[in-house]
Image: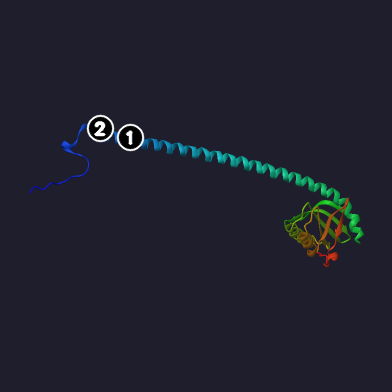
């Protein structure tokens, strides 16, 4: 009995015809065309993605520039507003603290205190002198607890500079603000600072004693 072997795969030998070869070539050609189109589409998408990334980067740069410009303008406005607050507060400081029993003999805005040898310096917004006691006033539009902590650091520097310069002067602190939150006001008074806040056309002073605390002296 004759054994018949079946074969698989592309036709060979006599099985190949022009039609079959042509069909295979056309199929390969179409496949290559499809691959080429896919590569073109991929390349187009990559270029589009690159364009979007570049545009986004430019937009981010412009946004950053505008934010810096806004910060600059806000800073300028804040400084101007702070100057206005100082101009309203300082002229009334003497009379207000005299009402509290301080014999103020000297007052002024913006003072820089330093000891060059030890390179310690600090600046104050306003100050008053009552003999050997000076009252240091920090003026903020909206004081925060960090501002209170900074005032404590300022008082410690003043004490250190006075000691290094051989001056027996004592210091008390005050914080003036246009808008005080209750917790910041309480924190300032508890720390031993006088609190100055608007009242009508002038301002009022709340002392630590008013809330059961003791004024702190450095």
At 74% from the left and 56% from the top, the residue drawn is 144
Q: Callout 2: few (<14), some (14-19), or many (20+) C-alpha neighbours within 10 Å?
A: few
Disc 1, disc 2: CB below 8 Å? Answer: no
Q: Secondary structure at mark 2?
A: helix
Q: Earlier in the sequence, mark 1 or mark 2?
A: 2
At 82% from the left and 46% from the top, the residue drawn is 84
Task: Please tell me which residue lies in front, 73 or 46.
Answer: 46
Q: Quadrant of the C terminus?
A: bottom right
Residue 45 spot, x, y in % from top left:
46, 38
Task: Please tell me which residue lies in front, 165 or 88.
Answer: 88
Count of number-bearing discs? 2
Residue 66 spot, x, y in % from top left:
65, 41
Residue 9 spot, x, y in % from top left:
22, 43
At 49% from the left and 37% from the top, the residue drawn is 48
Q: Callout 1: few (<14), some (14-19), or many (20+) C-alpha neighbours within 10 Å?
A: few
* 38 left or right of 74 in image: left
* 188 left or right of 62 in image: right
Q: Secondary structure at mark 1?
A: helix
Residue 43 spot, x, y in % from top left:
43, 37
Read off the residue under disc 2: 22
Task: Please tell me which residue lies in front, 142 or 83.
Answer: 142
At 78% from the left and 45% from the top, the residue drawn is 80
Read off the residue under disc 1: 30
């Amino acid at each position: 009995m004759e054994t018949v072997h079946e074969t698989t795969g592309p036709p060979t030998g006599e099985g190949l015809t022009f039609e079959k070869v042509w069909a295979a070539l056309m199929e390969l050609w179409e496949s290559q065309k499809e691959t080429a189109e896919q590569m073109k589409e991929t390349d187009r998408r990559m270029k589009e993605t690159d364009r979007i990334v570049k545009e986004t980067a430019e937009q981010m740069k412009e946004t950053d520039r505008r934010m810096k410009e806004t910060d600059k303008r806000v800073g300028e406005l804040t400084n101007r507003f702070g100057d206005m607050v100082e101009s309203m507060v300082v002229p009334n400081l003497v009379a207000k603290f005299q009402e509290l029993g301080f014999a103020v003999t000297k007052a002024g805005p913006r003072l820089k205190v330093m000891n060059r040898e030890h390179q310690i310096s600090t600046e104050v917004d306003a100050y008053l002198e009552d003999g050997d006691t000076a009252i240091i006033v920090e003026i903020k539009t909206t004081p925060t607890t960090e501002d209170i902590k900074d005032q404590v650091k300022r008082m410690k520097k003043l004490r250190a500079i006075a000691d290094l310069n051989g001056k027996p002067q004592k210091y008390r602190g005050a914080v003036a603000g246009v808008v005080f939150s209750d917790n910041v006001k309480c924190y300032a008074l508890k720390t031993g600072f006088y609190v100055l806040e608007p009242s009508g056309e002038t301002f009022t002073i709340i002392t630590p004693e008013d809330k059961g605390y003791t004024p702190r002296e450095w």
